Image: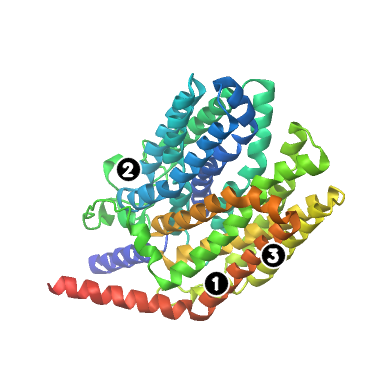
Amino acid sequence: MDDEKGNEESQVAREVIERYSLFTTAEKWCIIGMVAYAAWFSTLSSFIYFPALHVLSETFGVSVAKINLTITSYMAIATIAPTLVGDAADVGGRRLVYVITLSLYIGANIGIALSKSYHALLGLRVLQALAISGTFSIAYGVVNDIASPAERGSFVSAISFAITIAPSIGPILGGVLTYAADWSWIFWFLSIAAGIGLTTMIFLLPETSRNLVGNGSTRPPKYLRLPIRGLMRHWNKSHIAENHKWRTPNPLKSLKILARKDNIGIIIACGFLYTVYTCLNVSLSILFIDIYKLNQWQVGLIYLPFGIGGSVSTTARGLLTDKAVGGDLDNFPVEKARLGVIWIPMLLTAASVLGFGWVLHFHKHIAIPLCIQFIIGLCMQLDFSIYNTLLGDKNHRTPAAAQASSNIVRCTFAAIAISFLQGLIDAIGIGWTFTILSGMCLLAMSLFFLDYWKGTRWRQESLRRFAERRGRSDLD
């Protein structure tokens, strides 16, 4: 009798370990909601700032060019910050890194709101970027922690939506706060909103890193446990695994990810797409003010169609990216499973960007570019969601570091493009500038096709070489 009972308990224990994640569907969405909210600030902090540039120039008595330096410095730090926090979150735990980064972010915003000099503003903007820019990469890591490959698409869509809705909401919020109160209230708002997120995470966000808690059945260290006993707790004393072997976080791990042929192709493709996305958003207010003579309040509203398109895409993204994917991701052709649905959105993105440019070039009615902007938002967010899901599948052991490596490339590409954008428009015109951007979309599509064709083989070759090197190291 005791033997039978023991066998039953062993079987239950094995089933618990074998399940990809022990978190319930409701718990997963609660977790995703919290990390998506935190990731939202990484993009919002940049776009909410734009309407206040002229006011800041007058307040601190410096040129607009100097105020623009605070944007350039923010983007420069945003390029490298995820490499610092990405691997740290994979090693030390998601919960700990979130608490540290959000605390620093709140402090930086309070400091900016109280700033009395330009140099204080510049320095605190650097701290602000360092603190918050890596939260999106951790969020994608959390998705890989708790969602099986087959259900991952919907959760990735939620993260992508939070990040990409900021360019639409940010300028409106920034304009309203600057107009109704003062520029400092932009940063008081960010402090209060981030404080709500931090408090929620302290009490409700469980540790999810598979390196530390597996599928949720392993008891985490005391400093990573929730203060409320029993909440989202799926482990007990019988589920204690081996002690976690601590290692020092390695920021250069992101560069190693770029060295893989199957990674670098799609990461460069995303870099091209993100460059188009950034150039579109940066040029939007300038072009519409020049062509349609809009005021500051109206300019904030023209970002809405892009955001609405991204919102509408959320439903389609889940349907497209929630595909039947094998449990053994190392041997499953995830490239074909994910990229098989990207071709139509990519073609529509390229065509819409081309049409948008030439409609503005010939000064057509404002309703036409706004409608095309909706289509661009819809299709481009689908492109990003499919890409982010694929990148996570390819690098399922280090998803946060993989997102950090992607951020290095995309932010570098975007920063370079923005520095030449206005000069290019002045030299060759709006239509031909957006023709070049449309060509970048097609180039990105060709890189995705290359990965669809050869990505699985390249990935397995890289994994085989890694296993051989590790085997030789163990023998030594």
Residue underneath mark 3 = 350
Residue underneath mark 2 = 224
Q: Give amino acid for label 3.
A: Ala
Label 3 to label 1, Cα distance in Å?
A: 14 Å
In-front residue for pair 444/437:
437
In-front residue for pair 83/199:
83
Q: Give amino acid for label 2.
A: Leu
Left or right of 86: which side holds 275? Answer: right
- Residue at x 23% of width, y 54% of height: 244
Can I make out residue 151 in this image?
no
Residue underneath mark 1 = 447
Q: How crowded is mark 3: few (under 14 residues within 10 Å), some or many (20 or more)?
A: many
Q: First in sequence: mark 3 or mark 2?
A: 2
- Residue at x 79% of width, y 54% of height: 361
On residue 249, the disc is none
Left or right of 25: which side holds 278? Answer: right
**Closer to the observer: label 3 or label 2?**
3
Q: What element carries label 1?
A: helix
**Closer to the observer: label 2 or label 1?**
1
Q: How many numbered discs sit on the rendered protein?
A: 3
Percent of width and height locating residue 390: 51, 66
